[in-house]
Image (tube, helix red, strand yellow):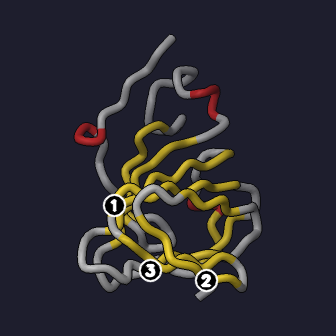
Amino acid sequence: MPFKSSLDSVEAYITRDGSEIRELLHPSVHPSGQVMRGVQSLAEARVAPGQKTLLHKHGRTEEIYHILEGQGLMQCGDEQFSVTLGDSILIQPGQAHCITNNGSTMLRFLCCCAPPYSHDDTDVLE
């Protein structure tokens, strides 16, 4: 059965890493059993110009970031690299990471998490 979520219908909140997100599809927010049997989540994240998320890692969760707008500097483990519109980044469980908005506009990206995002699985490292 299809399920539709709209960005404007979802309240924003701040995650443990300091980014503002809206859970577009998440089993704890949407009707039980309708969102992929609880195996993943999809959120839109925003980082304002000059801001960054806290360096953090997830013990169980694999993440994919997909840049929708803006530009930034991504740190994954010991590597740093620029990201911009259309880039996708795979972040493995246990890999320390953060993203800095080094542009002049809002940095917006999709964040797909499997298993779904959880504050309990987020370890802030700074």
Please state which amino acid type lies under the numbered disc 3. Thr
Q: Is residue 29 left or right of residue 59?
A: left
Residue corresponding to mark 1: 69
Residue 77 position by quadrant: bottom right
Which residue is most to the bottom?
126
Please state which amino acid type lies under the numbered disc 2. Gln
Provide residue 62's location: percent of width, then percent of height.
Answer: 69, 55
Tell me the SS state at disc 1.
Answer: strand
Tell me the SS state at disc 2.
Answer: strand
Contact flag, marks 2 and 1 (Cβ < 8 Å) = no
Circle on res. 80: 2
Which residue is most to the top?
1
Q: Is residue 5 above or below residue 119?
A: above
Graded by Cα atoms within 10 Å as few (under 14), some (14 to 19) or many (20 or more), the crowding at tag 1 reads: some
Give the residue drawn at x 75%, y 62%.
93
Q: Nearer the viewer, residue 67 or 35?
A: 67
Q: Quadrant of the C terminus?
A: bottom right
Mark 2 and mark 1 lie on one chain; the one further toward the N terminus is 1
Mark 3 and mark 2 lie on one chain; the one further toward the N terminus is 2
Work out how far the residue at label 3 is from the one at label 2, CA to CA, in angstroms: 10 Å
Residue corresponding to mark 3: 100
Q: Nearer the viewer, residue 77 or 19?
A: 77
Give the residue drawn at x 56%, y 57%.
88
Residue 45 position by quadrant: bottom left
Give the residue drawn at x 57%, y 61%.
119
